[in-house]
Image (cartoon, grey):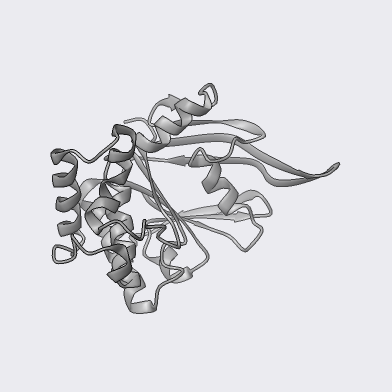
């Protein structure tokens, strides 16, 4: 089976006036189907930039990316947006739920927005996902009535709405207390095991990394090392 993610020679240079800053310097990264990988690094190491490039939110200065067999560099902005919506899932540190929407409507949004509305099939899928993440009794609650941990569970369900090949999580437990963080981590591990969903989790938290089956460390814009484990720590 081909790699879910194959990134080669990824470089990223930002310019402040005439002064260039090399944030990524020839990063190679490959993820196999079903991996639960932690992307670690200190502030300024380039991990958030790399996650944004893999998520097609930024174009790299150099290098190539293939996701689920699809080369990315030749895609137009419209094609990138469609690919991002249909084949990638996103979980953010701050859930970014729509406050006036119910949990069901928030989960259905990635499918409903391009279609111009929520179909019965979309609603059914969203409600099934909410039941799966333990929110069967909160499906019709507006986002404003959910706790922080519940909002992040909705965000996980939303990320899975379109059955993405790759789920990208940016500090997904960073805004939660330890109990809620553990529950969210347990849920991501469960989805990873049961659905063979591939996760790349950007984090600075060693306890999060210990629950993953692979650690990828960035330092000064380069991959410093990678290791595997059973992900049973913590």
Residue at horizontal 47 percent and vertical 39 percent from the top = 30
Q: Position of residue 47 (x, y in %)?
A: 57, 53
Residue toward you, 97 or 94? 97
| Coordinates of residue 230 in the picture (x, y in percent) | 33, 60
Query: Could you tell whether 163 is left or right of 225 in the image?
Result: left
Q: Is residue 178 visible?
A: yes
Q: Quadrant of residue 218?
A: bottom right
Give the side of residue 28 with respect to residue 13, left or right: left
At x 64%, y 48%, the residue is: 222
Q: Residue furthest right?
A: 18
Total labels drawn: 0
For this rendering, which residue is in front, 154 or 88? 154
Q: Quadrant of the N terminus?
A: top left
- Residue 160 rendering spot, x and y as whole percentages: 28, 47
Residue at the top extreme? 74
Q: Residue at x 33, y 39 (%)?
A: 113
Query: Image quadrant of residue 178?
Result: bottom left
Name the quadrant containing residue 207: bottom left
Q: Which residue is farthest front?
A: 100
98 to 183, vertically: above or below: above
39 horizontally vs 85: left or right = right
Residue appearing at x 25%, y 58% in the figure: 103
Q: Quadrant of the C terminus?
A: bottom left
User: Is 66 placed above or below 98 here?
Assistant: above
- Residue 40, position in %: x, y? 53, 59
Is residue 164 in view? Answer: no
């Amino acid at each position: 089976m081909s790699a879910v993610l194959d990134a080669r020679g990824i470089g990223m240079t930002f310019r402040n006036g005439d002064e260039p800053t090399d944030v990524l310097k020839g990063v190679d990264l490959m993820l196999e189907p079903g991996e639960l990988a932690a992307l670690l690094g200190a502030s300024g190491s380039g991990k958030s930039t790399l996650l944004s490039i893999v998520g097609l939110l930024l174009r790299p200065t150099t290098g190539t990316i293939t996701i689920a067999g699809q080369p990315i560099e030749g895609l137009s902005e419209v094609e990138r947006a469609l690919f991002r919506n249909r084949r990638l899932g996103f979980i953010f540190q701050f859930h970014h739920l729509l406050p006036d929407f119910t949990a069901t409507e928030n989960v259905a949004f990635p499918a409903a927005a391009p279609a111009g509305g929520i179909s019965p099939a979309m609603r059914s899928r969203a409600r099934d996902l909410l039941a799966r993440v333990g929110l069967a009794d909160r499906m019709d609650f507006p986002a404003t009535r959910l706790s922080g941990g519940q909002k992040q569970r909705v965000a996980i369900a939303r990320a899975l709405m379109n059955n993405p090949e790759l789920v990208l999580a940016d500090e997904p437990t960073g805004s939660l207390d330890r109990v809620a963080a553990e529950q969210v981590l347990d849920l991501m591990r469960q989805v990873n095991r049961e659905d063979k969903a591939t996760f790349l989790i950007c984090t600075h938290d060693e306890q999060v990394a210990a629950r993953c089956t692979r650690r990828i460390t960035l330092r000064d814009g380069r991959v410093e090392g990678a290791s595997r484990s059973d992900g049973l720590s913590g």
